Image (cartoon, rainbow, N blue to C red):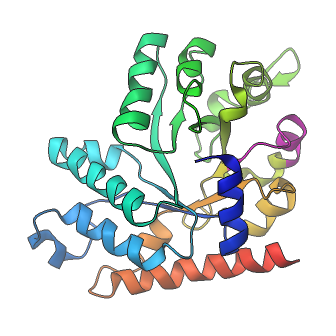
């Protein structure tokens, strides 16, 4: 998917919502556990209930890998279902990969060629040669961890060297990498005050923003400081949407929560 196609979908749906498909078998409705593939059946119901309100789905691969081969098969069935039934949706493999060049090439093939995701999250700690193999894929996007929403982010990401925080150095250095136009960045919603500084460095890039909802991030603050003329934001919500109910009405309740966020986004876009 091209960036322009993503922008067009955002403007058409009046939404820049990304729904995180982080499936925990201990939290899904009990009646689904009797099905052949509970993870896929849960995802399918959530997707069918929310596809018109969001522009992206983001499975965190840890929630699938934890269940071994069956979990990986559920992930594959989920991405195939999205690509076949809702091909306009932007898909994110939240895998946080990043390793030496030949290994990164294999990771990229796994997510871009085999599973056919549009994008994958990547850790930048090992530098240029660990990220450029992902960037080599045409019309695929690499979402680089920049400033995350977790408490431990302050252990390294905001440390200063030569009077500049590490996350800023990551942003600036990544712009020099080959095919850097295929980069997006993860920036946590719980750090909304940082968005103005981030936009000075990457004014045109899309930012994937976790932390709105269950983690306490504020949508309006993020948009105030982080939105650009092409919107440039994908706001992720996982638990707040998919676990709105653990009863038979789980899909309907998920839609209600997704609609609340989509309506807020619509108001912001129409201002």
Q: Residue at x 57, y 21 (%)?
A: 131
Location of the C terminus by quadrant is bottom right
- Estimate the x, y position of residue 1 in percent, counting from the top left: 58, 48
Q: Which residue is drawn at 80% across and 62% down?
A: 223
- Is any part of residue 113 visible from this angle? yes
Q: Quadrant of residue 163?
A: top right
In depth, the one of 244 and 117 nearer the eye is: 117
- Estimate the x, y position of residue 165 in percent, counting from the top left: 79, 27
Q: Give the range drawn in magenta.
A: 196-207
Q: Quadrant of residue 56?
A: bottom right
Q: From what the image shows, is residue 29 above or below residue 16?
A: below
- Estimate the x, y position of residue 99 in percent, counting from the top left: 46, 17
Q: From what the image shows, is residue 98 above or below residue 184?
A: above
Q: Residue at x 9, y 72 (%)?
A: 34
- Estimate the x, y position of residue 113 in percent, counting from the top left: 39, 34
Q: Does the magenta stretch include residue 203?
A: yes
Relative side of 249 to 37, left or right: right
**Label tally:** 0
In depth, the one of 135 and 68 nearer the eye is: 135
Relative side of 67 to 79, left or right: left
Q: From what the image shows, is residue 19 above or below residue 62?
A: below
Q: Residue at x 65, y 64 (%)?
A: 9
Q: Does the magenta stretch include residue 265?
A: no
């Amino acid at each position: 998917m091209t960036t322009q196609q993503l922008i067009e979908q955002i403007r058409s749906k009046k939404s820049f919502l990304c729904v995180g498909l982080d499936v925990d078998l201990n939290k899904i409705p009990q009646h689904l556990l009797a099905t052949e593939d509970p993870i896929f059946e849960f995802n399918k119901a959530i997707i069918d209930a929310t596809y018109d309100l969001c522009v992206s789905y983001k499975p965190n691969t840890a929630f699938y890998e934890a269940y071994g081969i069956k979990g990986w098969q559920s992930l594959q069935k989920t991405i195939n279902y999205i690509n076949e039934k809702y091909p306009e949706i932007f898909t994110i493999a939240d895998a946080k990969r990043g390793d030496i060049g030949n290994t990164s090439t294999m990771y990229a093939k796994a997510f871009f060629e085999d599973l056919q995701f549009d994008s994958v999250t990547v850790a930048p700690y090992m530098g240029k040669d660990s990220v450029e193999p992902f960037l080599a894929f045409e019309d695929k996007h690499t979402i680089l961890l920049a400033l995350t929403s977790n408490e431990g982010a302050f252990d390294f990401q905001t440390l200063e060297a030569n009077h500049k925080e590490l996350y800023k150095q990551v942003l600036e250095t990544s712009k020099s990498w080959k095919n850097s136009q295929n980069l997006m960045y993860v920036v946590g919603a719980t750090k909304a005050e940082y968005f103005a500084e981030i936009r000075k460095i990457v004014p045109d890039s899309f930012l994937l923003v976790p932390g709105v909802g269950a983690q306490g991030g504020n949508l309006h603050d993020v948009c105030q400081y982080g939105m650009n003329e092409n919107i440039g934001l994908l706001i992720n919500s996982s638990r707040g949407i998919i676990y709105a109910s653990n009863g038979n009405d789980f899909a309907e309740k998920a839609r209600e929560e997704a609609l609340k966020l989509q309506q807020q986004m619509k108001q912001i876009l129409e201002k």
